[in-house]
Amino acid sequence: MPPVPAITDIEALKDRAALARLVSWKAESVNAARFDRGELTLYLDRAALREAATLLRDDPELRFNFLVDITAVDWYPSEPRFEVVYELLSMQRKERVRLKVKLDGADPKLDSLTPVWPAANFFEREVFDLFGIVFEGHPFLRRLMMPENWQGHPLRKDYPVEGYR
Amino acid sequence: MEYETATPVLECGAEDRNMILNMGPQHPSTHGVLRLLLEIDGETVVRMMPDIGYLHTGIEKTFEAKFYQQCVVLTDRMDYLCPMTNNLAYCLAVEKLLGLEIPPRAQWLRVMLNELTRINSHLVWLGTHALDIGAMSVFLYCFREREELLRLFEMVSGQRMMTSYFRIGGISLEPPLGFFERVKKFAAGFPGKVDEYEALLTQNPIWIRRLKGVAHLTAEDALALGATGPTARASGIDWDLRRDQPYSGYENFQFRVPVAQEGDVYARYLVRVQELRESTAIARQALEGMPEGPIKADAPKVVLPDREKMKSQMEALIYHFKIITEGFSVPAGEVYHAVESPRGEMGYYIVSDGTPKPYRVHMRSPSFANLQTLPRICEGRLIADVVAAIGSIDIVLGDIDR
């Protein structure tokens, strides 16, 4: 068992600057929050993602100026199936925050963060390639790791480990 | 800020005078199987598009089919120039999931070996980078010292490159007799060797002309494009995880973080050469302050028992059998843990669903993000500078493609 149980109550986590700022901006943008093992995770509304990311980047108190990573998790067969995960870092505050957006398997689409952080380019292409999640507004959404003519998305859970033979 | 680098080279409707040149994947200076599509106007690079994936082995998918302790072996195979850093990042992430406390001796050993690994990686970088630019002899000097390091790694782990020496909960074995003396001897002699490299390069007029002012990366670009490590620090971003978010006991060590403001290839060279000296200093501190005590955490359900105990105690034998055959379950949850690898921030994002196999593992590899700066620093420059630029961002293709 983890030594400290996770905190999932938004009210109890209001002392976290990133969460407080997002809630004061638009309360409905944050669907849920979780503080576990010293890491803060915010579940964002799909529509609010890009604006929320811009806010976190530009707010002079927060300055989450660095996009560390983008990846995804496939919870097949449960729905909403995909979670897209963003790791942000504030060098000023020496603090990290994780943003998550849940997506249905039938409609795996969300806004690209390339206008906010150009670093998102390769990360989003990788997620598109390996999970089949579409990032709208990405300048060049093509397969990155797999060959152009590859069938399927290998990191999905319904894709066999040994591949299709 | 315009980041036109995202436009595809082949579909940009190139003017007739421009030529598309294919560099790699089989090219000696791309440091692996990196393919670059260059749109060139005479000798000038107009646009560049990196094409990767030639070394993609689906390692993230493989993780999902292995027990947690089996995955340690896979981590070496990504960034093969700094295997111990990979081991450390993965082990720390799993230990965070488990809530394990690591004994100080294991932490100190991990720090020492990580710094030796950093020296090893930087030596390969310096040797090949100089070789690309035409300074052949530096390569031989660097590999002379690297050989001693590989022998040290072989001494502790039995392997020269794919060490897999760290375990979840500690390290696998106590270092053999005579190991610390050899490390001490190496650490005492190495700063003199760095002086030798510097004597060959730092003031060398040819070296300076090939490197100074070439492939310039501004601090804003470095941040926006996700660059970390020496690549970012040479552009004036004073950020080092060892100092700013310490892990594995780094807060107990005194060291300087070299930073340069120029952001060109020469600045990156200077930063890495200074890091060689700093790493030696950290390794020496780890040697001097090496605590006594166990090298594995007290967690019989996670850490394999000693061989002796396993053969003499029933309980230890049962634990051994259970860990080997069914693994150990990890409490559900997710963590991201990052360490400062020789190339920048190397992070492991692990999702556990409470079973003995990870539900999802993702590596944030520094080379992958640093590669995105390459078009930015090469466009508008000469093809000959592309070679210097690739060397200066120090990418490892195994790490990029995974």
Image (cartoon, coloured by chain):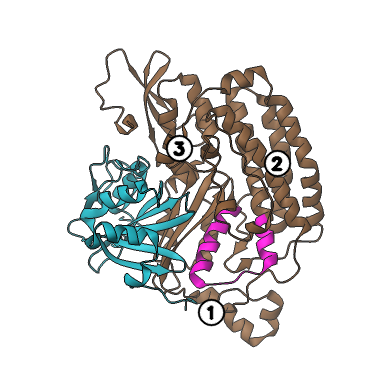
Chain colours: A cyan, B brown
What subunit carries mark 2? Answer: B
Distance CA(mark 3)–CA(mark 1): 47 Å
Please state if B282 lies on the left or on the right of A6 as rendered. right
**Image disc number at residue A51:** none
What distance separates the C-alpha of mark 2 from that of mark 1? 45 Å
**Residue B284 forms part of the magenta stretch:** no
Position of B125 relative to A165 (above/below): above
Considering the numbered disc 1 on the image, is that residue within a helix, a strand or a loop?
Answer: helix
Quadrant position of residue A114: top left
Q: Residue at x 45, y 49 (%)?
A: B402
Three-letter amino acid code of the residue under disc 2: Arg
- Amino acid type at mark 3: Ala
Nearer-N-terminus badge (3/1) = 3
Residue at 50% over, 43% down? B228
Residue B159 found in image quarter: bottom right
The numbered disc on residue B277 is 2
Q: Nearer the viewer, residue A79 or B325?
A: A79
Question: Which span is picked out in magenta?
Answer: B84-111
Disc 1 residue type? Lys
Q: Which residue is mark 3?
A: B222
The residue lying at 65 percent from left, 63 percent from top is B107
Q: Upstream in the sequence, badge 2 or badge 1?
A: 2
Residue B85 on the magenta span: yes
Q: Which mark is residue B322?
A: 1
Task: State the image coordinates of residue A66 (x, y, percent, origin top left).
Answer: 42, 46
Residue A101 visible (yes or no): no
Residue B232 in the image, given as x and y percentages of width and height: 51, 39
Say which chain tag 3 marks. B
Residue B292, given in percent of the width and then of the height, sits at 76, 68
Point 57% across, 20% down: residue = B210
- Real-space Cα separation, disc 3 to disc 2, in angstroms: 24 Å
Task: Please give left or right for residue A101 compared with residue B204 in the image.
Answer: left
